[in-house]
């Protein structure tokens, strides 16, 4: 397996890619203007979609960028552009990661980097994923909330009583739940009664990673059937299994399951650490995953590449650690 070393961060770095919710108007504009590699990537995305997605990314309006079918390919494009710019600026220090993972949508980004599918197919697939998810949201309105400071078993019992679902197990003490809005209100109330340190209602358009995404599953399976998947050149750790996706069948099953299933993010990071990962680098907008990794482990350094400066400064450890 290929390895790389980044300024003493060890020979086994893992690359991470964020999911929906980390988008902001203006993201990627500095990369487009100053990095030929990133500009080429953005242009390829626009060409694949047949429209200027980058216009919404760079200029807005915010409501257009935040539409699920726009923000999903936009976040993928931004993450890949950050990686392209970092590789361009740090040719000697940024090569192949030891392992990779992406949170929800970010899993598709990791699969592109691993060569499982090409960029054109991937951005159109996540565009369709976003469209199907938006339709499911309209058919079955729902929401999500982050529960802080409760054990997983307690949160699971709260969800059972309220009729909602655990959507993301992100880190020790941070679990996201998802479901019907009225039932979620009841779950929030129960969580507070059980002593949750904090409950945060998330600004999302639907109950992602829950049974309410069920109407999107049929269309998603059809879309997945239309894509040819290659064997991964770099192992990608699956959201639902927290194990490497080793074959064509594994990838299709994982991408279908994670639509309605729980993202086992804490377990994914723990698996990587057990496999010998020495550091983590998040590529893409925001720094949500970097924060979660720091909650999971204090041993492995974490870097974030989310703009031109952090991409160019990666080899010097200047990426917002």
Image (tube, grey):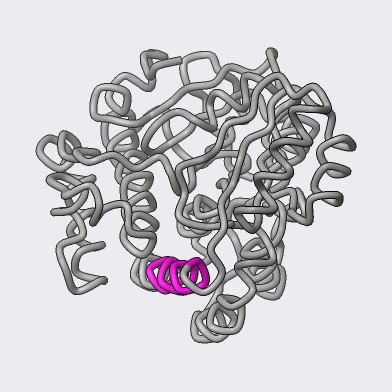
Residue for point 69% across, 53% down? 183
- Looking at the picture, tell me which residue is in the foreground, 218 or 29: 218
Q: Residue at x 41, y 71 (%)?
A: 131
Q: Is residue 181 magenta?
A: no
**Spot occupied by residue 72 in the image (x, y as percentages of width and height):** 39, 57
Residue in the foreground of this view, choosing between 261 and 314? 261
**Magenta-colored stretch includes residue 129:** yes
State which region is magenta: 125-137
**Quick check: 4 above or below 38?**
above
Q: Residue at x 52, y 74 (%)?
A: 139
Left or right side of 104 for 93: left
Task: Name the foreground residue: 251 vs 288.
Answer: 288
Judge whether 138 appears above or below 27 on screen. Answer: below
On the image, the x and y values in percent for residue 111 come to: 53, 58
Residue 227 % position (x, y): 50, 80
Q: Quadrant of residue 210?
A: bottom right
């Amino acid at each position: 397996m290929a390895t790389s070393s980044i300024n003493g961060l060890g020979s086994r770095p893992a690359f991470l890619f964020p999911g929906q919710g980390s988008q902001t108007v203006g993201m990627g504009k500095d990369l487009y203007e100053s990095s030929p590699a990133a500009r080429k990537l953005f242009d390829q995305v626009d060409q694949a979609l047949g429209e200027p997605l980058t216009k919404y990314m760079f200029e807005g309006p915010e409501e257009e960028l935040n539409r699920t079918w726009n923000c999903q390919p936009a976040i993928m494009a931004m993450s890949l552009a950050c990686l392209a710019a970092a590789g361009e600026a740090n040719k000697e220090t940024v090569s192949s990661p030891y392992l990779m993972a992406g949170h929800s949508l970010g899993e598709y980004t990791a699969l592109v980097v691993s060569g499982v599918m090409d960029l054109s197919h991937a951005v159109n697939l996540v565009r369709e994923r976003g469209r199907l998810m938006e339709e499911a949201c309209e058919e079955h309105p729902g929401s999500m909330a982050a529960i802080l400071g409760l054990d997983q078993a307690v949160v699971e019992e709260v969800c059972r009583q309220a009729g909602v679902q655990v959507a993301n197990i992100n880190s020790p003490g941070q679990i996201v739940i998802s479901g019907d809005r009225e039932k979620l209100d009841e779950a929030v109330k129960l969580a507070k009664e059980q002593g949750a340190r904090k409950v945060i209602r998330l600004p999302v358009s639907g109950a992602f990673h829950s049974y309410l995404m069920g109407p999107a599953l049929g269309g998603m399976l059809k879309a997945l059937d239309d894509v040819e998947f290659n064997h991964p050149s770099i192992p990608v750790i699956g959201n639902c299994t927290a194990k490497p996706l080793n074959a064509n069948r594994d990838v299709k099953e994982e991408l279908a399951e994670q639509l309605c299933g729980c993202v086992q993010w804490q377990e994914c990071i723990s698996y990587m650490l057990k496999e010998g990962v020495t550091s983590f680098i998040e590529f893409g907008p925001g720094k949500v995953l970097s924060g979660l990794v720091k909650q999971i482990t204090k041993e492995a350094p974490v870097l974030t590449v989310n703009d031109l400066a952090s991409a160019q400064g990666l080899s010097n450890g200047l990426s917002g650690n």
